[in-house]
Image (tube, helix red, strand yellow):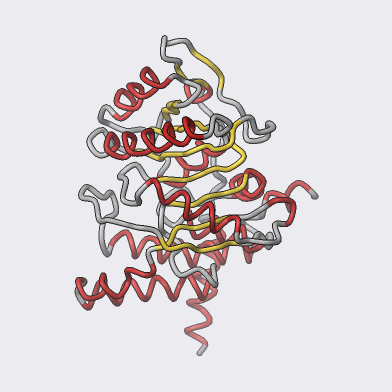
Amino acid sequence: MILALIVLLLVVVIAHVSAQVVDETRHEKEKHYLTAKGKKESFPSLMDPPSLELSVVVPSYNEELRMPVMMDEAMEYLEKRQNENPLFTYEVIVVDDGSKDKTTEVAMKYTKKYGAQKVRVLTLVKNRGKGGAVKMGALSCRGKLILMADADGATKFADIEKVEEGLQSISEKPDNMAISCGSRAHLEEESVAQRSMFRTFLMYGFHFLVWFFCVRGIKDTQCGFKLFTREAALKTFPSLHVERWAFDVELLYIAQCFDIPISEVAVNWTEIEGSKLVPVWSWLQMGRDLVFIRLRYFTGAWRLESERKTQ
């Protein structure tokens, strides 16, 4: 018992001491986007009033091969929707997370085709991780609603209508804050049948850690298809610390701390080759991050943004 307490205390100390403040300072190159004609324009701020109906944030790291399929599908859907309803306005922000390939060049082709009012490219000087890329993109949005969508196109883009319905199903939105999460939980039985016993054990272990330490009531926290009201994004993203794979969990943890209602909606999902997630090792890293998320908030190493402002 004494040994267990010593180990627990050591873990708490390590979690607290190793907590780092996220560097939110933007490099000068990250403050601007290029228009179709190559002119520099400044990104707006999430703090500004919205001027569009929808913003789509696409975090991308070395996605020159997979991104075109997703972008073609997304732009076809968005253009069709706008043609049917001219009042519907949108933007897509592709966030190149310090890629080593031609992700930015590929994304810029869509800016040249559709214009910078519809497609903007935010190129990060260094790799931050998926969470950092999503946060930087969200903080540069103009939409009333903000959709987070993966560059691999694993979720059909038309399923945005499902997460929109999930958002609308939330009857009470305090200060218009709400989040709708795409979910693959309905596919779990099939995936279990295809996984090894060890990987299945890790998957269920991860789910348990999510439930025990951070987020309850959400079966699939990791699906990269989430819709936020602008008010919910403004409340959650400024407090986000985790910049890599476990960032979804912290984001939802922050939302639940602020009593922001969250709905979960089943979406279509297909395994796409080329995932940056390394099986087993990435899950172990995420498991560590889950424990540290809770401990760092518990010890005060991390604080919610509104708590810091009131002190």
Which residue is depicted at the point 19% across and 74% down? 196
Residue furthest front in the image: 84
In the rendered image, residue 163, in percent from the top left (x then y), is placed at 50, 54
Q: Which residue is at the front of the view, 40 or 278?
A: 40
Q: Position of residue 197 (x, y in %)?
A: 22, 78
Relative height, residue 84 to residue 134 (above, below)? above
Instruction: State the residue at coordinates (45%, 17%).
Output: 34
Whole-percent x, y for residue 18 in the image: 51, 55
Q: Position of residue 205 (x, y in %)?
A: 37, 75
Relative horizontal placement of residue 194, taking residue 36 as reference (left or right): left
Image quarter for residue 172? bottom right
Q: Tell which of 157 and 93 is nearer to you.
A: 157
Left or right: 265, with 76 as reference point: right
Please, is residue 277 above or below residue 287 in the view? above
Residue drawn at x 32%, y 21% as measured from the top left = 109
Does residue 268 appear left or right of residue 134 in this picture?
Answer: left
Q: Is residue 269 above or below residue 66?
A: below
Tell me where residue 280 sits by quadrant. bottom left
Q: Nearest the camera: 64 or 165? A: 165
Taking the image as shown, residue 55 lies to the left or right of residue 50, namely left
The mark total stands at: 0
- Closest to the observer: 250 or 303? 250
**In this view, which residue lies farthest toward the right?**
310
Instruction: Give residue 23's quadrant in the image.
Output: top right
